[in-house]
Image: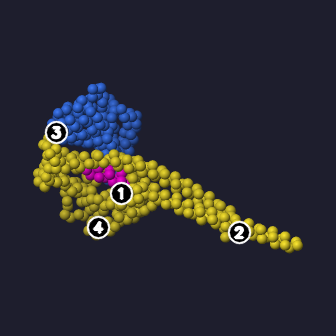
Chain colours: A blue, B yellow
Amino acid sequence: MALDLVIVTPEGEAFSGLVKQVVLPGSEGQFGVLEQHERVLAPLQHGVVEIKTDGGSQWAAVSNGFADVAGERVVVLADACTLAADIDQSGVEEAKSEAESELASLGDGEEHDARRETLTEIVRQSEVQLEVLSK
Amino acid sequence: MPSLKDIKRRITSVESTQKITSAMKMVAAAKLRRAQETIENARPYAERMRSTLEQVAGSMATVEHPLFEVRDDVRSIELIIITSDRGLAGAFNNAVIKLAEQLLAEREGSLDKVSLTLLGKKVADFYKRHRPGDVREAAPVGNNPTYAEAAGVARAAAKRFEEGEVDEVILVYSEFVTTMTQTPRVVQLLPVSPPKTAEDAAPASEEDAAPYDIEPSPESLLSVLVPKAVETEVFRALLENAAGEHAARMTAMESATKNTEELIDKLTLQFNRARQAAITSELVEIVTGAQALD
């Protein structure tokens, strides 16, 4: 239990604590980090993070970030991160379907470029959160 | 001379205005506290972002990214202007709009095209009236700006920049300095000024100098980090705008409350004088009546 894991998002610290192992969704595929890992800087994609402690596993949804691993310390920077315990299934499903229907109604006009990107991001984040719940 | 009843009515109306302004002040104060917390929460992320970007760039001989490209002949610029959705916040929104207008007046001569991305109803209303042809996208900022919204705006702008549709993207927003001061600012969002490379940056400390294994490659990580830096900048501007809005409203409502107090004092004095005058004239009438009987 000597891996110090911190997950930081623009909205604050999502997780911080000592863990045994963490499995991250790297952009080149999943990878696990145990203590004494070599220094690595790797981008992450939208995906599921598995946090293993003595008490069992915890899952979290992260989107779009990178991990900075050095010895006993792992820092994950992500656009968003939600722990499984904090995910409200019906809320996420609702947000997802709302975003999808708005996306469908926007059309292709360039006056909605930014809104479209935002909605796409919400849909992707919701999908990952739902995937976490199925674990 | 207004009658006693008129003055009484005015006092009551000013008193109810005072209730509204002082309630608005308290609401703004509470919201300001929350907005400041959000800014604090965002800080560690932004700092780690920046230091990682510097580290990655520091390990490379040359850094290249499409978003660094400075174009010699700037023909088309995009302005992202951020204000609040609602007014009653003193000069807060107007200061931003004024700065944007100034910027446009200075630069427009050499440009073929200006496009505006407007966040916040106040600025959207203004430009929909004054430059409807240049407005590309307008959206309210809402009560709690999310990172996804900021990312959407930043990604759309970065895409247009990479495709060559715009040559420069400029952000105009209010910086939250203190509760009393909000300063409108102009920041160049794109092209991003490149971080220092291995050649011009000396390793800062032993720890930073430790060899990093960057997977799959420094270039690929840079392509993740640079757009993220842009997104973070937009997000920060949104948060500063939110905090500034509440601070400005708090200050405006405080002085409004103070003004109503003064007005009530003045009206009360007027009311008392009028009442006294009425009593005096009544007395005079009675006395004169009594004397006439003698």
Q: Which residue is mark 2?
A: B277
> What amino acid does circle 4 point to?
Arg
**Foreground residue among B65 and B211:** B211
| Residue at mark 1 to residue at mark 4: CA–CA distance | 27 Å
Query: Where in the figure is residue B265, as x and y percent of width and height?
Result: 59, 63
Q: Main secondary structure of the magenta part?
A: helix
Vertical side of B109 occupied by B224: above or below? above
Q: Which residue is mark 1?
A: B177
- Assign the N terminus of chain A to one quadrant of the image: top left
Residue shown at 13% from the left, 52% from the top: B202
> What amino acid does circle 3 point to?
Arg
Residue shown at 12% from the left, 43% from the top: B211
**Which of label 1 and label 4 is nearer to you?**
1
Q: Which residue is mark 3?
A: A39
Vertical side of B10 occupied by A109: above or below? above
What range of the chain is rendered magenta? B227-241
Q: Which residue is mark 4?
A: B107
Which chain letter goes with mark 1? B
Residue shown at 33% from the left, 43% from the top: A12
Q: Quadrant of residue A91?
A: top left
Graded by Cα atoms within 10 Å as few (under 14), some (14 to 19) or many (20 or more), the crowding at tag 4 reads few
